[in-house]
Image (tube, rainbow, N blue to C red):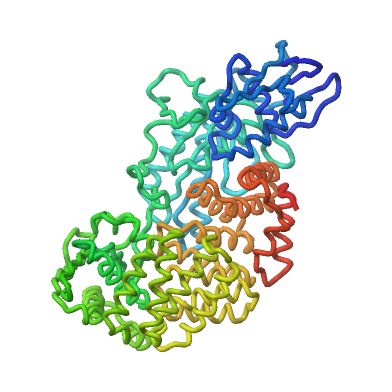
């Protein structure tokens, strides 16, 4: 269809805009926006309508939308002052007000199928436990190969034409939408049956995006509106889900097999998909399938507090026990951050979802200087309580109480301690009740992990240093507070906060009874200071002290990545994610970048897409994904991702980003920069 207005012709089929006989260069999103306004010229189009139609419902800033509106006006000789063709209606939206004449257009340049109906693109993206947390790269390759074979077989059975894509991503074009949806549903169901017969670590799941309309296949990969829409639908899709654009959903027949649920103004989801958990269920755990480790494994759930005066004590006591167990190499321990997200869950439920056998639950009640603690250890495999105990104690004996409970866990799980572990597990300090009160209240504030709570925790730990200057706890936790304030942008002066984090971490590292947490901070401060050998030494020492710690593994992986050892970084990044299955996105950023730098591009792409699924507005995750896709020679997809980066951060440039990347090898950084330039990231 051609749309003529003034001296312009917009050819929807060829995706061309002409002024007279001259073809005008138009960015794809600007073309989509202009076409949508013209096709809906009989009404005022809201911002939400535009975001759904042009951006696929992704989060878009007002400035990004305004830039596209201004660009659309510019290419048709209009402007914001005159508004002769595109008029703004304050607080309402926009409308194309020019006179338009519709004419039948020429033949489409879309890759066709030679059959009737509206062609549709299906995009399938893999998600597998083994990519994020596995230990056998050979097995991972086999898992992805089997999954791909199932998808391809289903698509071909339904008459698809497969498109050239790198790695595990699968794209195909179908002659009509119902075939595309049927093929995706059959593939999902076949995978589900196959997964039931496989060990948990060998299961693979896919998410599907389906869009109807135009696409192009060329030397730079598959592109065009339908291909980009299918990709956008996959970004936030749950594993096992099948999402489709509005234009695809309206072409489905009225049939129970094609029943859908509307998600937003521009997308629908096919019903009877995988169960991802109830509302508020962590996205990281959706259909994760973690297997049990081959050693005693446990999660310590947050203790319940009876009354406000018991809250700080209950949090502190549980984390004391957690910290002691973290230092033991013979136990597999879920990180406290993941356990915090399961507050209120039963022990059996929590253990099943994070892939461990045992769960410790407890409650704390405080009255003046007396404390009562109830704990129970549950074996989730049988749903039975291994042991339970009630402790009545003076507050002065808090650390003795922690040691006693830790000892009971070690005995119950038959954990063998090495001599070095024996020496560092038990506490030797903080006998002063006031110091311990500061410590517990600081920990209680710290675990809330926001700007205000970290600032509050920092005050408690500064006070702890005054009360107990010989204890490593104050400097250690103060360093942690300063590090998070620096790296998360919560500090007034991030550079100064990072410097202070290093100073306090260095002080804690040199103290008796240092528990290794300060080592993790110091290693990464030294990395930012480009003191690479020191960074490696301190990060390795942190892991020696805390072999079961997610942060020790994650921080070491970060140092290894930038110091030019990406293969080793992969090992520790995956281990960090397994210890913290409700993982922070930056753990997966380290993993995806390490995969990329180690040459495992398919795994890098899968991991980077997981970052986007959990945190859809991430810029760093998109940079890693864009570089991995560009390095795989799929420039059409890389450029789409680069446009998303500019939409999220209109001021982003490589010149501003490069100094934040502390690579030891300048050639490795130059390779990433070259990838991003190819993708279209501005210099």
| Residue 346 in sight | yes
Q: In this picture, is 200 found above or below 30?
A: below
Q: In this picture, is 538 found above or below 658?
A: below
Q: Quadrant of residue 22?
A: top right
- Asked if residue 248 lies left or right of residue 221, the reply is left
- Asked if residue 550 lies left or right of residue 565, the reply is left
Q: Quadrant of residue 634?
A: top right
Residue at the location (33% across, 66% down)?
444
| Rendering coords of residue 546 (x, y %) | 41, 77
| Residue 174 in sight | no
- In this orientation, which residue lies closer to the viewer: 302 or 631? 302
Residue at the location (21% across, 81% down)?
397
| Rendering coords of residue 238 (x, y %) | 44, 42
- In this orientation, which residue lies closer to the viewer: 239 or 447? 447
Q: How many marks?
A: 0
| Rendering coords of residue 671 (x, y %) | 72, 60
- In this orientation, which residue lies closer to the viewer: 340 or 429? 429
Q: Quadrant of residue 46?
A: top right
The extreme right residue here reads 21
Q: Quadrant of the N terminus?
A: top right
Q: In this picture, is 349 found above or below 296?
A: above
Residue at the location (43% across, 42% down)?
191
Q: In this picture, is 252 found above or below 666?
A: above
| Rendering coords of residue 36 (x, y %) | 63, 23
Residue at the location (51% across, 54% down)?
142
């Amino acid at each position: 269809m051609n749309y003529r207005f003034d001296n312009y012709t917009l050819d929807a089929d060829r995706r061309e805009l002409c002024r007279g006989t001259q073809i005008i260069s138009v960015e794809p999103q600007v073309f989509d926006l202009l076409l949508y306004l013209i096709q809906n010229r009989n009404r005022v189009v809201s911002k939400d309508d535009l975001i759904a139609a042009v951006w696929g419902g992704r989060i878009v800033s007002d400035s990004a939308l305004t830039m596209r509106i201004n660009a659309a006006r510019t290419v048709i000789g209009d402007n914001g002052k005159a508004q002769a063709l595109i008029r703004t209606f304050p607080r309402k939206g926009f409308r194309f007000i020019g006179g338009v004449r519709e004419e039948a257009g020429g033949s489409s340049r879309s890759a066709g199928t030679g059959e009737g109906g509206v062609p549709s693109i299906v995009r399938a993206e893999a998600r597998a436990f083994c990519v994020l947390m596995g230990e056998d790269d050979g097995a991972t390759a086999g898992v992805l190969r089997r999954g791909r074979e199932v998808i391809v077989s289903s698509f071909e059975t339904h008459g698809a034409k497969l498109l050239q894509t790198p790695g595990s991503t699968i794209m195909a074009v179908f002659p009509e939408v119902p075939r595309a949806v049927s093929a995706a549903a059959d593939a999902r169901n076949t995978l589900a049956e196959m997964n039931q017969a496989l060990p948990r670590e060998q299961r693979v799941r896919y998410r599907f995006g389906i869009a109807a309309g135009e696409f192009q296949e060329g030397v730079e990969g598959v592109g065009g509106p339908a291909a980009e829409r299918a990709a956008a639908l996959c970004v936030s899709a749950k594993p096992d889900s099948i999402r489709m654009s509005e234009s695809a959903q309206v072409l489905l027949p009225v049939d129970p097999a094609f029943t859908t649920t509307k998600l937003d103004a521009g997308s629908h989801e096919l019903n009877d998909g995988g169960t991802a958990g109830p509302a508020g269920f962590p996205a990281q755990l959706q259909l994760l399938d973690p297997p049990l480790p081959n050693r005693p494994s446990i999660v310590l759930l947050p203790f319940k507090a009876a009354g406000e005066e018991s809250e700080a004590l209950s949090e502190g006591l549980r984390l004391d026990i957690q910290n002691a167990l973290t230092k033991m190499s013979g136990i597999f321990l879920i990180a406290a951050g993941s356990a915090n997200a399961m507050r209120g869950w039963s022990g059996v439920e929590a253990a099943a979802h994070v892939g461990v056998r045992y769960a410790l639950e407890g409650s704390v009640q405080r009255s003046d200087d007396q404390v009562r603690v109830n704990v129970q250890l549950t074996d989730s495999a049988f749903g039975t309580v291994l042991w339970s105990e009630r402790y009545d104690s003076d507050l002065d004996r808090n650390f003795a109480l922690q040691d006693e409970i830790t000892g009971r866990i070690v005995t119950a799980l038959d954990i063998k301690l090495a001599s070095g572990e024996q020496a560092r597990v038990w506490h030797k300090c903080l006998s002063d009740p006031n110091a311990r009160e500061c410590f517990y209240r600081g920990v209680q504030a710290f675990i809330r992990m926001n700007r205000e709570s970290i600032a509050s925790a920092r005050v408690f730990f500064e006070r702890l240093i005054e009360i107990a200057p010989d204890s490593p706890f104050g400097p250690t936790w103060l360093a942690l507070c300063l590090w998070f304030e620096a790296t998360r942008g919560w500090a007034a002066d991030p550079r100064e906060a990072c410097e202070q984090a290093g100073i306090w971490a260095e002080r804690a590292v040199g103290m008796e009874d240092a528990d290794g947490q300060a080592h993790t901070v110091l290693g990464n401060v030294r990395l930012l200071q480009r003191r690479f050998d020191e960074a490696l030494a301190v990060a390795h020492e942190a892991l020696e002290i805390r072999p079961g710690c997610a942060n020790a593994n994650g921080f070491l992986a970060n140092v290894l990545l930038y110091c030019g050892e990406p293969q080793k970084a992969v090992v520790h990044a995956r281990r960090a994610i397994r210890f913290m299955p409700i993982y922070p996105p930056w753990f997966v950023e380290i993993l995806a970048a390490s995969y990329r730098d180690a040459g495992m591009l398919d795994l890098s792409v899968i991991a980077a897409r997981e970052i986007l699924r959990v945190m859809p507005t991430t810029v760093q995750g998109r940079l890693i994904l864009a570089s991995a896709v560009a390095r795989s020679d799929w420039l059409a997809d890389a450029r789409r991702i680069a446009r998303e980066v500019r939409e999220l951060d209109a001021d982003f440039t490589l010149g501003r980003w490069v100094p934040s990347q502390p690579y030891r090898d300048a050639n490795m950084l130059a390779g990433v920069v070259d990838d991003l330039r190819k993708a279209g990231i501005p210099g």
